[in-house]
Amino acid sequence: MYEWLKDYQKLEEELAYLEFNLEQTEIELKRWTSGDLAKVKLQEDSLGAKVEEVIEKIKNDITFKKNQKHQLLRLVSTFKGLDHQILRLKYVNGMTLEEIAEELNYSSSHIKKKHAELVRTIKFVEEYSSL
């Protein structure tokens, strides 16, 4: 989970790319089924013949990534108050600890200390859960 938190922004980018890719692939499928390529005979092993399979794979990837995102947001929401704000601003919004300190009117050292405590807590729960 902690690694997922660190990769939240990357997860967002991957989801955006997958959704764009899905849209483009669905446009391609329409070209093959009812558009300018409808009369082109496809070879069984060609990319065009596998567009529907590609769409299904992309949809599965999107579902998986959205599930990961939901789990991360659920994890962040289990924390309350300042802890919640630090996790949300750091991992969801991508802010630095210094920016968070300024935003929340705390000293940088206090936010860094709270963040370190949160990371230890999350890692402890991960280790305990894997037993």
Image (cartoon, rainbow, N blue to C red):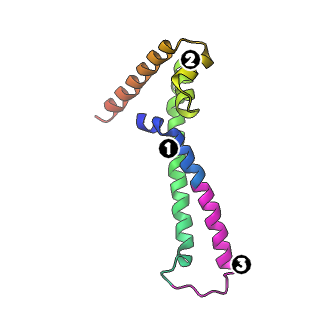
Image quadrant occupied by the N terminus: top left
Question: Is 49 rendered above or below residue 41?
Answer: above
Q: Residue at x 47, y 39 (%)?
A: 7
Mark 1 and mark 3 in contact (Cβ < 8 Å)?
A: no
Percent x, y of residue 61: 51, 55
Structural distance between the alpha carbons of marks 2 and 1: 28 Å
Q: Residue at x 53, y 23 (%)?
A: 86
Residue that badge 1 annotates:
68
Q: Residue at x 46, y 35 (%)?
A: 6
Q: Which residues fall within the magenta stretch? A: 18-43
**91 relative position to 26: left or right:** left
Instruction: Identify the mark at residue 101; answer none if there is no mark.
Output: 2
Question: Is 9 rendered above or below residue 19?
Answer: above
Percent x, y of residue 96: 53, 26
Residue that badge 3 annotates:
35
Q: Residues within 10 Å of mark 2 (few under 14, many from 20)?
A: some
Image quadrant occupied by the C terminus: top left
Amino acid tagged 3: Gly
